[in-house]
Each structure stands twice: as structure tokens, then as C-alpha cells.
């Protein structure tokens, strides 16, 4: 499996390209900005996008969705409880940031436990509300993409609409910390970590 991290936009949200070398298929996770750069990386790696997956609906994680969808035709996927963020600038916070983002509705609404197939790679959806109502993490093998739920020695903000700190901590403890300690965590901002490191050193947990 190929994993390419691209920090994009002013807030340097991590966009991830998850590729299947055997089939040349790929998922793009959280294309927050810089669509041209993302597409160039896909071209260099000779990958075809079969899924655009959003861990949640905030502007810094969805900003390039429209351009990427237009260029690739790939289905856009987001949890049902964050679906409105694609069509409502007030919900996705772009109005607050001074740049209006409005897109077409998602092609697929995700739920906890859903799987997404990308070539020979299977991605599992884990609903982890707290940062937003429909926040998700995406797991494949011993790799976990946590969006803005869990960071290296930190956790996501919960002061935006739909956020709740108690719910966020519950999500992390009940759904993420139960995973094997060697599970590699790729968060929505900043560097990678592991479940074991966060259990031992994250001051919020």
C-alpha cells in the first residue's frame, strides 16, 4: 500500500493519497486545498482515483473537493451527519474563514462500520464524533487515519458547532485506544504517531 501525505492550504491540513500498487487505484482522503498539486502527485504515481473520502466537513479538509471531483469523476464520501457541510458554507466554516465553499451533495453517505474498497485495499469507517457530529477515522490494516479526532499528543477542537469534548474523548477511548498499540496514526494535522504512544503520553487521555 502506498501512502503519500500532502499538507495543503493555509492551515496545512494533511491530505492523504492511499494507493493500491497492484491495481493503480487510489483514494484521496481530505483534499483540503491545492487540487493541482494533489492531481500532479496522482499523475506521478500513475494512480487513478476511485474514492474521495472526507473525515469531516470543515473547510480546511474539503476545499479541493469540487476540482478533484471534476477532474477524476470519483465519488465523494462523507458521514451522513456531516453531509450538510458540503452544501452549506455556515456548516463547513468557510463563511467564517472568509471564503465561501459550496459543493454538490456527496455521492455516498457513510456510516460506522462501512467499508470502502480501493483496488485490493479495504478501508474501514469508524465513526468518531466529537470534533464534528459526523467525524470519522479510516482504518486499513495497522494504519489509522484520524482526521481532526486525534493528533500526536493532542486531540481535536470541540468548540465549533457540533463539537463536544466529552463525546470526543469517549470516541477516542472507546474506538481508537482499543486498537493494537503498534497501529500507526496519520492525523489531519501534524506528524504521525501510534496508538501506543498516545495511550502513554497524550495529556488529554
Image: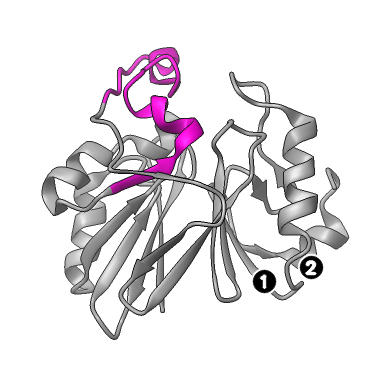
State which quadrant residue 48 falls in: bottom left
Q: Is 155 on the left or on the right of 144, as rendered?
A: right
Q: Is 84 on the left or on the right of 150, as rendered?
A: left
Q: Is residue 94 magenta?
A: yes
Residue 183 shows which numbered tag? 1
Q: Of residues 112 and 61, which is closer to you in this image?
A: 112
Colouring style: one colour
Q: Residue at x 34, y 72 (%)?
A: 19
Give the residue pinned by disc 2. 196
Spot occupied by residue 43 in the image (x, y as percentages of width and height): 16, 66
| Span shown in magenta | 76-102
Residue 16 shows which numbered tag? none
Disc 2 crowd, CA 10 A, few/some/many (<14, 14-19, 20+):
some
Spot occupied by residue 174 in the image (x, y as percentages of width and height): 78, 52
- Helix, strand or loop at mark 1: loop
Q: Are marks 1 and 2 in contact (CB under 8 Å)?
A: yes
Please tell me how many numbered marks the rendered image carries: 2
Q: Residue at x 79, y 42 (%)?
A: 170
- Helix, strand or loop at mark 2: helix
Q: Of residues 29 and 6, which is closer to you in this image?
A: 29
Residue 163 position (above or below residue 140): above
Disc 1 crowd, CA 10 A, few/some/many (<14, 14-19, 20+):
many
CA gap, disc 1 to disc 2?
A: 8 Å
Spot occupied by residue 126 in the image (x, y as percentages of width and height): 59, 53
Query: Could you tell which of marks 1 and 2 lies nearer the N-terminus?
Result: 1
Spot occupied by residue 190 in the image (x, y as percentages of width and height): 57, 51
Q: Residue at x 46, y 65 (%)?
A: 123
Q: Residue at x 71, y 27 (%)?
A: 164
State which quadrant residue 27 falls in: bottom left
Residue 133 position (above or below residue 204): above
Amino acid at each position: 500500500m502506498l501512502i503519500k501525505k500532502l499538507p495543503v492550504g493555509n492551515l496545512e491540513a494533511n491530505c492523504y493519497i492511499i494507493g493500491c500498487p497492484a491495481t493503480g487505484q487510489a483514494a484521496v482522503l481530505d483534499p483540503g486545498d491545492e487540487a493541482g498539486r494533489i492531481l500532479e502527485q496522482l499523475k506521478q504515481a500513475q494512480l487513478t482515483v476511485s474514492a474521495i473520502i472526507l473525515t469531516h466537513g470543515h473547510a480546511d479538509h474539503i476545499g479541493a473537493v469540487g476540482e478533484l471531483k471534476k477532474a477524476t469523476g470519483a465519488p465523494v464520501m462523507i458521514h451522513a451527519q456531516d453531509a450538510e457541510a458540503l452544501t452549506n458554507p455556515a456548516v463547513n466554516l468557510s463563511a467564517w474563514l472568509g471564503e465561501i465553499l459550496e459543493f454538490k451533495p456527496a455521492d455516498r453517505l457513510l456510516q460506522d462500520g462501512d467499508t470502502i474498497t480501493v483496488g485490493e485495499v479495504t478501508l474501514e469507517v469508524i465513526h468518531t464524533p466529537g470534533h464534528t457530529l459526523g467525524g470519522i477515522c479510516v482504518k486499513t490494516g495497522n494504519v489509522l487515519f484520524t482526521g481532526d479526532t486525534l493528533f500526536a499528543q493532542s486531540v481535536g477542537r470541540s468548540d465549533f458547532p457540533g463539537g463536544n469534548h466529552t463525546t470526543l474523548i469517549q470516541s477516542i477511548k472507546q474506538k481508537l485506544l482499543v486498537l493494537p498499540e503498534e497501529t500507526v496514526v496519520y492525523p489531519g494535522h501534524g506528524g504521525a504517531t501510534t496508538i501506543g504512544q498516545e495511550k502513554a503520553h497524550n495529556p488529554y487521555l
